[in-house]
Image (cartoon, rainbow, N blue to C red):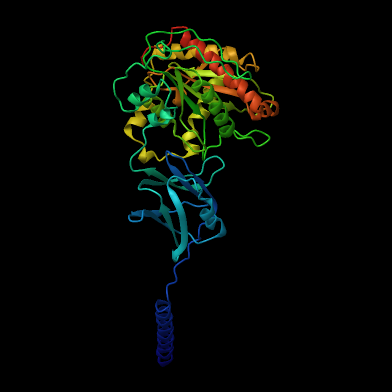
Amino acid sequence: MARTDQNKNSEFTTQSINRRRLLASASSLILLPIIPRVAHASAIVAVRTWPADDYTRVTLEMDTELKAEHFTLENPHRMVIDIEGLTMNSTLQELVSKVRPNDPYISTIRIAQNRDNVVRLVMDLKQPIAPQLFTLKPVGEYKYRLVVDLYPRVAADPLLALQQFDDNDPLAGVLESLAQNQPVVPPPSVQGQEVPRIAQPTTPPPTTAVPRVNQVPGRNRPVLIALDPGHGGEDPGAIGPGGTREKDVVLQIAQRLKRLIDAQPNMRAYLTRDRDFFVPLGVRVQKARRVKADLFISIHADAWIKPSARGSSIYALSQNGATSTAARWLADKENQADLVGGVNIGGQSRQVAEVLLDLSTSAQINDSVRVGSGILSEIGKINQLHKRQVERAGFAVLKAPDIPSILIETAFISNPNEERLLRSAGHQDKLAQAMLSGINDYFSSGVALANHG
């Protein structure tokens, strides 16, 4: 019995010692400092700026999504952006040299490590701004993007772009009245003749033959053509095998066409973008409606997975589905431009959003097909046609209910031969001339939709 009691006492003593050791170990663990797990600092992979009169965009592309806060300061005007989870690197420093002297909004950018894991950007501004800051998830070739859009506090009226005329231009008073929303007063007589809806063109240079246009009476303001160069800015569009970007060549073609149209005595052209910046699809339509355009032409350069695809084609809007699988595929692709170009969904006004509703009318679509057919016939004289009739699909950019609207695929930029043609100034001139001929035929025929007289 004594031996048993001795064993029990020994067990108790051993358990007590073990218990004390366990408590001591636990106490030492409690006293250890808690070291937080260090988050992986995001890396900036690219920085870009897109200055334009409409707005300037600054884009920071990175490998992870980041949180940013911003505020503005007055006297002088500045915008401050704090980006969390970021440390300085050489790519981010490049943003300082990306600011261009002709930027309407940014004077300089200063960058510093404000505190641990937070980088501060200070933008010195040339004018008061209404900024928008948002993030975009990866799409296409892009990773996460932090986008900073600097808009003017008072937006410029797009009609002001139509007032770049000579003081002796007989249409000056008409365009000024339009810009000020005043009743249009018919332009004064020129050499004893009233300026008609479309007057006879002046004698062009020998290298640019302008077709003869019949006079259409009863028009008291110039015919306005909205030209929409596709893509732009963050959205390069299709890229040819030689590296040619769609956004560049379609802007060049649109600018050549604008010069031809402006040379007509009673016609004016308006560009939805006049340089390399992105314009959301709804804003393109809104701009055309704001200037009361009589015709909307969106200019593109097609691409396909096979380099053998070639030829020009023209599209109008469809209310009842696409006329072909290819037309539907193209419309879906073009309608994704906002995802690539980068749209701040929260910043889109209701008016812009409503533009993309299908409010089209049969009259608008019929006129679109009519003018598209005429232009397609003219383009067919200088380039092979991919489709010999105007196709139709649900293109968002063609949804202005009161403006005949077409989308021209000038050629396949994915075809090496057509890519070379698109880069040629001579071929661009031929395309612009063909489009002008089709436009003039449409308006001189007297069947144009009479919603803007």
207 relative to 351, above or below = above
**In the image, residue 451 lies at what x, y percent?**
36, 14
Residue beneath the point at 40% across and 92% down: 2
14 relative to 403, above or below = below
Q: Nearer the viewer, residue 30 or 187?
A: 187
Q: Nearer the viewer, residue 255 or 238?
A: 255
141 relative to 170, above or below = below
Quarter occupied by the C terminus? top left
Q: Nearer the viewer, residue 114 or 14?
A: 114
User: What is the quadrant of residue 376 in the picture?
Assistant: top right
Residue 324 visible = no
Quarter occupied by the N terminus? bottom left
User: What is the quadrant of residue 6 in the picture?
Assistant: bottom left
Q: Nearer the viewer, residue 93 or 9?
A: 93
**In the image, residue 175 lies at what x, y percent?**
38, 24
In the picture provided, is 60 more to the left or to the right than 156?
Answer: right
Residue 422 visible = yes
